[in-house]
């Protein structure tokens, strides 16, 4: 596991205090990652974001701290919006993160974009078996990525970006890892919000919101078909696509009708 040296940092008056690691989570981390070391990492994150929250070097340190705080991670990255309103990977610990993220932006699907759009944490157990983002998962699998955790950077009801970790092995992230990633993301979002310009562009384009909304509609309808026909996700999605082709409609339109019939 990658090792960095973290110093102590004190928060300025009026700024959020460093997040604390709950006792039960710290206890479950075990001797390999002592609680004091985790607290030191979070304190260092707090201090450096107070100093210069939007500097690229600061965000690079954020990704290194994230990989350290989530021990199962092999790589980490953070996505934000640039001055032109384009979604970009602002910092990453490994080139594979930038490649995997670029695929998400191009395909307009993936766990990080869904975490961003839904403002909720997303966990992908195995890209070899994923059906929520099948095109991206196949490409990510070819890159050697098997597990993903992605947390939105949310502050004041606004999503500022996404923080994510990738792993080479399937199903390596636990509920504790989810809590730890959310802990870092919450700390980072609160402090990054203070460094944003008031003229910053919208954080997620309406077109991308629409794409993700449609995908969630299809996912919900797929779940209904799985339950109704006692079948797997792939077979259920094929039913949906076949119905769309047969009626000259899009899968989203068929999904909307199906959910409407169900009263969803």
Image (cartoon, helix red, strand yellow):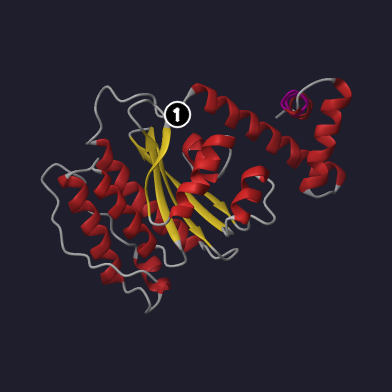
Inspect this view and state whether residue 95 appears.
yes
Give x and y (percent) for residue 154.
37, 39
Question: What residue span does the magenta drawing correspond to?
Answer: 252-256
Check if residue 253 falls in the magenta segment: yes
Give x and y (percent) for residue 257.
77, 24
Horizontal relation, residue 198 to residue 208: left or right: left
Inspect this view and state whether residue 227 appears.
no
Give x and y (percent) for residue 19.
28, 55
Dominant SS type (magenta): helix
Horizontal relation, residue 240 to residue 10: left or right: right
Which image quadrant for residue 13?
Answer: top left
User: Can you identify the residue that label 1 sits on?
Assistant: 204
Q: Is residue 254 above or below residue 59?
A: above
Q: Nearer the viewer, residue 261 or 171?
A: 171
Task: For mark 1, give the secondary structure.
Answer: loop
The quadrant of the picture occupied by the N terminus is bottom left
The quadrant of the picture occupied by the C terminus is top right
Q: Which of 84 and 188 is in front in this view?
A: 84
Identify which residue is drawn at 23% across, 65% down. Answer: 40
Categorize mark 1 by other alpha carbons within 10 Å: few (<14), some (14-19), many (20+): some
Q: Nearer the viewer, residue 233 or 73?
A: 73
Give x and y (percent) for residue 188.
30, 47
Check if residue 62 falls in the magenta segment: no
């Amino acid at each position: 596991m990658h090792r960095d040296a973290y110093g102590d940092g004190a928060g300025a008056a009026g700024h959020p205090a460093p997040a604390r690691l709950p006792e039960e989570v710290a206890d479950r981390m075990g001797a390999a990652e002592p609680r004091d070391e985790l607290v030191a990492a979070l304190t260092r994150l707090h201090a450096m974001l107070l100093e210069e929250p939007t500097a690229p070097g600061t965000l690079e340190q954020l990704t290194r701290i994230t990989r350290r705080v989530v021990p199962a991670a092999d790589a980490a990255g953070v996505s934000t919006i640039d001055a032109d309103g384009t979604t970009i990977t602002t910092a990453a610990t490994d080139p594979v993160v930038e490649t995997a993220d670029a695929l998400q932006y191009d395909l307009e699907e993936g766990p990080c974009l869904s975490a961003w759009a839904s403002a909720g944490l997303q966990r992908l157990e195995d890209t070899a078996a994923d059906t929520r983002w099948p095109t991206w998962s196949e490409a990510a699998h070819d890159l050697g990525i098997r597990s993903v955790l992605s947390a939105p950077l949310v502050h004041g009801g606004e999503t500022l970006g996404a923080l994510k970790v990738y792993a080479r092995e399937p199903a390596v992230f636990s509920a504790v890892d989810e809590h730890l990633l959310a802990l870092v993301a919450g700390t980072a979002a609160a402090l990054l919000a203070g460094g944003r310009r008031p003229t910053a562009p919208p954080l997620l384009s309406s077109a991308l919101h629409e794409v993700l909304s449609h995908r969630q509609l299809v996912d919900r309808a797929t779940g209904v078909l799985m339950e109704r026909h006692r079948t797997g996700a792939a077979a259920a999605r094929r039913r949906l696509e076949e119905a769309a082709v047969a009626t000259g409609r899009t899968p989203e339109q068929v999904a909307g009708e199906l959910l409407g019939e169900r009263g969803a």
